[in-house]
Amino acid sequence: MAITAPATSAPAVALEGVGRAYGERVALRAVSFALPPGATVAVFGANGAGKTTLLRILAGLLRPHAGRAAVLGAELPREAWRARGRVGLLAHEPLLYRDLTVRENLRFHARLHGVDPARVQALCDQVGLHARADDPVRTLSRGMTQRAAICRAVLHEPELLLLDEPLANLDPGGALAVAPLIGREAGPARVLISHDAEQGLAEADWVLGLRGGRQALWAPAAQVELADVRGLYA
Amino acid sequence: MRGTVAALVRKDLRLELRAFESVPAMLMFSVSTFVLFRFGLDRSSLEGDLAAGVLWVTLLLAAVLGMNRLFVAEREQGGFDGFLMAPVDRTALFVSKALVLLGFLLVVELAAVPAFVLLLLQPGAGQALPELLAVLALADVGIAVVGTLIGALGVQTRARDLIIPLMALPLLVPVAIAAAEATAPLFAAGGAEAFPARWLVVLALYDGVFGLLAYAVFDFLLEE
């Protein structure tokens, strides 16, 4: 379980013994890995294994209580400001205001990130949201909300994408439409939480397995069998 | 930072116009409280200290309703996360929320103060409108600054409806005292008396001190 140092420059993610607790409950313990720029790590683990905590630490939204964490060369939390605007987060919650329309939400985030508002329309068209772009988010189906959340996550063309079950609620057409934005071909490094072992392995260069907050697996995806992943859920 | 503040204020005003969650509640509360005072005190009109006290206690309690709702969308709909991940000055959130709360207070007072005059003020009292507006403006700034600070702190807790008034009201006692002292002579029986400008200075000092304090600590309140 040694840290795999990349041959290239600063890794997209570098963790050394990272831990995090909520009160007395330890959610994450001694997680260490390094993800090269542009690579994808698939994170597997049962409910409560610490996946979401890991994602929120990488997003700069939670402080690690132990160890060292760096994202895009910025030490967390001391240099978190350097990573702001360079990370895209697609969480369980869409991070969209329900009473605003899709377009208003995306324009708001575009303004925060200094993105050309024209990109909002382009993204809506790309994911098939053009007909619903002026509807309040609360009126959208889960699948449409997920498409809007994906647009928000990639609006500012992040260098690191943190994806928590990105294809949840999407129909096959939706999954196809968002693939160029969040799939392997999108370009940025990705931390991908998935419960679909086959799909997760197919998407990943590296695999991280978590069990009860501990790092149970870190290996190149090519060396990981489906049974290894399924074992994490046993 | 100005562009970010403008975007945040626009977003909050849009949310209020769609949901009508804060301003109508604050206004209804104010008018209902004036009606309760009218019948509870069993007096058809008030003047001086009593009138000023009723006005400011009511406005402060109405403001607490606004504070309670100020950060709810950020907390419940992921607004904090989206904002914290953006490459913007975090103080912009404080400034925008304080401006929004100030705007809500002004809109509420636009209707609540005339309702107070009609329901509770002795005919002929309350003629010194410019002075009253100056007191309202300075007190509102203080309420908005402290309310934003406490709102951001309280929304992180499960018992925000309890925590926010418990923290905000003691901090706002100086505003209540200064505003009531400044307003009482304006509501004197038989017409406005000499306006005690020193209380405006007290309000301005309060605004300045808490403005600086909030500016200094708001970043830390956003940390988990």
Image (tube, rainbow, N blue to C red):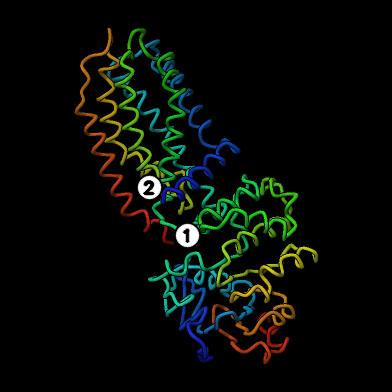
- Please report the residue visible at 69 percent of the width from the left and 74 percent of the height from the top: A195
User: Residue A55: where, in percent of width, then height?
Assistant: 55, 71
Checking the image for residue B149, the label placed there is 2
To which residue does mark 1 refer? B84
User: Residue B150: where, in percent of width, then height?
Assistant: 38, 47
Pointers 2 and 1 within a single chain: yes
Looking at this view, is A167 or A213 the one in front?
A167
| Left or right placement of residue A34 versus residue A75 in this view | right
**Disc 2 and disc 1: Cα gap in Å?**
17 Å
Chain where mark 1 sits: B
Q: Quadrant of residue A203?
A: bottom right
Q: Give yes or no for contact between labels 2 and 1 (Cβ–Cβ under 8 Å).
A: no
Q: Residues within 10 Å of mark 2 (few under 14, many from 20)?
A: many
Give the residue type that dot 1 points to: Leu
Question: In the image, is residue A86 above or below residue B48?
Answer: below
Q: Residues within 10 Å of mark 1 (few under 14, many from 20)?
A: many
- Please report the residue visible at 63 percent of the width from the left and 84 percent of the height from the top: A207
| Left or right placement of residue B139 versus residue B7 in this view | left
Question: In the image, is residue A55 above or below residue A124?
Answer: below
- Please report the residue visible at 59 percent of the width from the left and 87 percent of the height from the top: A218
| Left or right placement of residue B224 versus residue B193 in this view | right
Q: How many marks can you see? A: 2
Give the residue type that dot 2 points to: Leu
Q: Secondary structure at mark 2?
A: helix
